[in-house]
Amino acid sequence: MIRPSYSLALFALLFGAGFGVSTAEAQFVPGRGNLMTTDNFEIEKWGMNYNLPKSSKEEDEQIRYPLALSTNGRWKEGPKRGIPDVVKVIETPAGGIPGSQHALLIRSKDTGIPGRLSYSQKQDDLVMVSNSMGIGNSPSVVSRVYLPDWDEWENRAGVAFGMRVGLQGPMKKVPDASDNPRFFRRNKPITVMEPYYPGFFLQFNPKEVSQDKQDSVTVLIRANEYGQDTPGPKLTQTGWYTFGMSISPDATVHYYMKPGVEDLTEADYLTSTRPYGIPGTHFNTLFFNICNGDDGKTWSTPIVIDDPQIFYGQTARPTQTAQRQTTTQRTAQPSNNGQVNR
């Protein structure tokens, strides 16, 4: 079995209380309740309609319609940063979920503005198509993530991959003309629905620059109430890991992870935060980031995901857990036609 370099339980003990949320309050385990949407990548002829050039609103305010959309309607391009260059179904790497024949490879070379190199870290977004819901519905997300052998990682110290959720909630801010040009009043605070994106980032630490001369990944948790990332467990083994997040009705986000592909349990709890101090009210989606140095020639690390899932409606004593389906059942799942609200 894959083992992190130190105990996840120890991390929870050391850091879990640092955000004013006790471990007991945080035992809202992702992956229980009602399954709202998922993709197991077993459908024949799964593909992506890329509709290039990709969007780059974050960099140059350009959303380039039509946005990329998967052939099964469950994935779309993120308008903020654009679609990864490679979104491809492959054979499930060894050690994956029992019964899984296929998983999804995500990779990019050109992550910034199309046709313009930045020579700095940029990212692309793959967004799961999902209905928006109030966080009173106790949403949670789970995905299995495969980390390739160290010699396949982009040789760059920095973030390689992210798994995040889209939330929003009311926040007071001093507006500028872009908020509402018609009613713009300088220095008068207004309340806006602010989007924010808590989650995990995987930061690669190449052995060439690491103090212990060993390749590793630091799990960064985004974010605390001040918007700062928190360093989590340090992973020194590659292979499959399971990541999950749950959002309780008070807008607290709970973070879980474990080595391997088994369902998450209370023992896999890391920490809880109230990201950015925003009183979130709505959950919108689950999405994945792929990052590289945007130099026009170097590919990002080839990350693989399997069975990303969105749940809702967990109770204090969960009685229903979505189970892995057999290979035959996996090919017959209906498409989710909900819209992403970001």
Image (tube, rainbow, N blue to C red):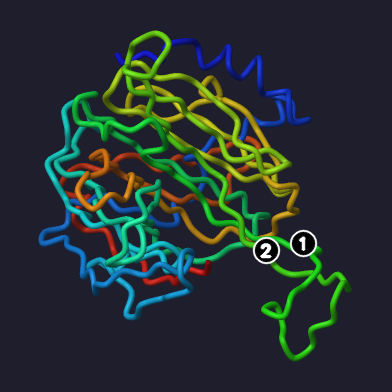
Q: Quadrant of the N terminus?
A: top left
In the displayed structure, does residue 89 sit left or right of residue 219?
left
The single residue placed furthest to the right in the displayed view is 188
Q: Residue 171 shows which numbered tag?
A: 1
Q: In this orientation, which residue lies closer to the viewer: 94 or 117?
A: 117
Residue 39, percent across and down?
A: 30, 53
- How far apart marks 2 and 1 lie (CA) works out to 6 Å
The secondary structure type at the circle numbered 2 is strand
**Left or right of 172 on screen, residue 221:** left
Label 1 neighbourhood size at 10 Å, few (<14), some (14-19), many (20+)? some
Residue 52: image location, x then y, percent = 24, 72
Q: How many marks?
A: 2
Q: At x 47% / y 40%, what residue is drawn? A: 31
User: Looking at the picture, how far across and down is residue 290, in whole percent?
Assistant: 34, 47
Q: Residue at x 24, y 51 (%)?
A: 109
**Residue 194 lies in quadrant:** bottom right
Left or right, residue 237 beside residue 228: left
Residue drawn at (37%, 55%) of the image = 118
* Residue at the spot of label 2: 194
Between discs 2 and 1, the one toward the N terminus:
1
What residue type is disc 2 on?
Glu
From what the image shows, is residue 48 above or below residue 5?
Answer: below
Specify the quadrant of the image occupied by residue 226.
top right
The quadrant holding residue 248 is top right
Outermost residue to the bottom:
182
Q: Amino acid at mark 1?
A: Met
Q: Name which residue lies at 51% across and 23% down.
A: 268
- Contact (CB < 8 A) between labels 2 and 1? yes
Q: Position of residue 65 (x, y in %)?
A: 35, 80
